[in-house]
Amino acid sequence: MQKFVCVHGHFYQPPRENPWLESVELQDSAAPYHDWNERIATECYAPNATARLLDGEGRIASIVNTYSRISFNFGPTLLAWMKRAMPEIHEAMVEADMRSRQKFSGHGSALAQVYNHMILPLANRRDKYTQVLWGIRDFEFRFGRKPEGMWLSETAADSETLDVLAELGIRFTILSPFQAKSVRELAAKEHWKDVNGGCIDPSRAYLCKLPSGREISLFFYDAPVSQAIAFEHLLESGERFAGRLMSGFSDKRDWDQLVHVATDGESYGHHHGFGEMALAYALQHIESNNLARLTNYAEYLEQHPPTHEAQIHEGSAWSCSHGVGRWMANCGCNSGGHAGWHQEWRAPLRQALDWLRDQLAPLYEVKAAALFRNPWDTRNDYLDVILDRSPENVEKFFEKHGHHPLNGVEEITAIKLLEMQRHAMLMYTSSGWFFDELSGLQTVQVIHYACR
C-alpha cells in the first residue's frame, strides 16, 4: 500500500476594479497598502513563490516555490490584475506549473477556476457555460495548456454544473465531504451507502455519473485537517502540520491512500503569518523522510482511476450548511463578527440582479442579432477581446463573428453590448453575499457592476 499527499490552495480575491475605470482605487481598509489585492499579494502570493526553508540554526537553507509542489488555482480576474500590477508573481506561478509537470508525470498542478467566482447552482445554464468556458480559456492563455481540473466557486455544485464541466472537457473537481450523499462500488453495483454528514472516505477518487450520460471524477477533501489549517493554528509549526497530514492515513485501508486537504490559499501567509514557511517545511519533511509521496490530483487520477461512484447533494457548497442559502437568503451563515445582525438583504439583492439579467438578455439578443451571426457564441468568445484589447485583435474578433463588415458606429455598439453582458456576470461575484455588511466593499462592488 502506497501513501500519497496532496495539498490544494484556492487562491482568490474578488475583482476590485472600478467598473468605469477598469482600475483598482484606493482602499483605506487595506492600509498601509493601496488595496487588498496588493496587501494579500505581498503577504501571501509573493511569499509562496519564494518560501524560506531554515536550517537548525535558523538560517535560510533554501528558497522554495511552493506552488510547484502543491495543487493550486488562482481566480482569472485576480491573475489579470496580477499580470498588470505584479507580473513577476504571475510568471512565478506559470513557471511553477511547468515544474510540477516534470515532477508529477506530465500533469501540471494548476487548476482552472470558474471565471468570476459565480455561484453556479444559482446561475442559468447559459451563464454556467460561459463562466466555465471563460475560466478554461483564461487558463489556456496563461498556462499554455488545457486544464484537467477546475475549482468551483465555494465548491458550489449541482448536476447541471458538473455536466457543463464534463461537456467542456474538465476531468475532475474538488468538493467538501459534506457535499457527498451516497457511494457504492462501480464493479459490484451494490446498494448505495449513505455518507451524509461528511462520512465519505476521502482517500480515493470517485466517479459521478450524470443524467446526460457524461461522467466526471470527484475528490472529497479531508475536512478535519483542512479545518485545522484554516482555523486551528496548525500552520504555527511545519512539523506539526506534516504530522497532522500523516494522521490522515489508516492501517485499516488495504488500498493506495490519498490524504488531501483544501483551504483558501490565503491561509499560507495572509491569514496565518509565515504560513508559507510551514507549508514548505511540511512538504519537505514528508518527502525527505519518505513518509509519503507528494502528488497532484491529475497524476493521482491517472494512476488510480475511480473504483467507486458517488452522488452529491444538489445545490451544496463548502461554506454553507444550508446548501447555497448563503448567496440567496438569510440562512444563518455569516461572517464579519456583528452579533445579532441578520442578512435579510441577500434575497432582494439576488432577486434584483436576476431581474436585471433577464431584462438585459432579450435586449442583447435583439440588438446583437443585427451585428453578429450568433450573439451567444459571440459572448462565449468575447474573452479573447478581454485578454487582448489591441485594435488588431478587436478587428479580428469582429471579422470572425460579424454578421457583415461592421462600421465604426456598429463596432462601438457591439462592444457596448458585450460589455453589458460581461458586467451582468461580474455582478454575481460570490463575495457580494458572503459577509454581514450590506455596505461593505464586496456587496457595493457587485452593485457597481449592476449599475454599469
Image (cartoon, rainbow, N blue to C red):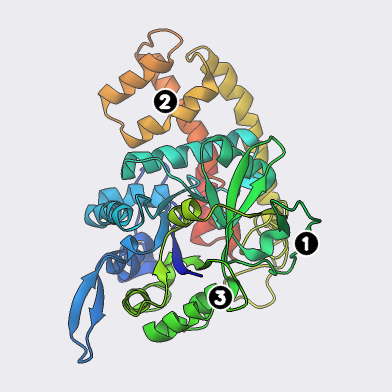
Disc 2/disc 1 C-alpha distance (Å): 52 Å
Disc 1/disc 3 C-alpha distance (Å): 25 Å
User: What amino acid type should be assigned to the residue bearing mark 2?
Assistant: Ile
Using the image, tell me which numbered label, if any, was put on residue 443.
none
Across and down, in percent, residue 133 comes to 49, 36
Q: Nearer the viewer, residue 264 or 201?
A: 201
Q: Which residue is mark 1?
A: 193
Q: Secondary structure at mark 2?
A: helix
Q: Nearer the viewer, residue 440 or 392?
A: 392
Across and down, in percent, residue 118 comes to 56, 48
- Foreground tag (1 vs 3): 1
Q: Is residue 413 above or below residue 193?
A: above
User: What amino acid type should be assigned to the residue bearing mark 3?
Assistant: Gln
**Sequence-wise first label, 2 or 1:** 1
Task: Mark 2: give few (<14), some (14-19) or many (20+) Cα within 10 Å.
Answer: some
Q: Secondary structure at mark 1?
A: strand
**Residue extending farthest bottom:** 57
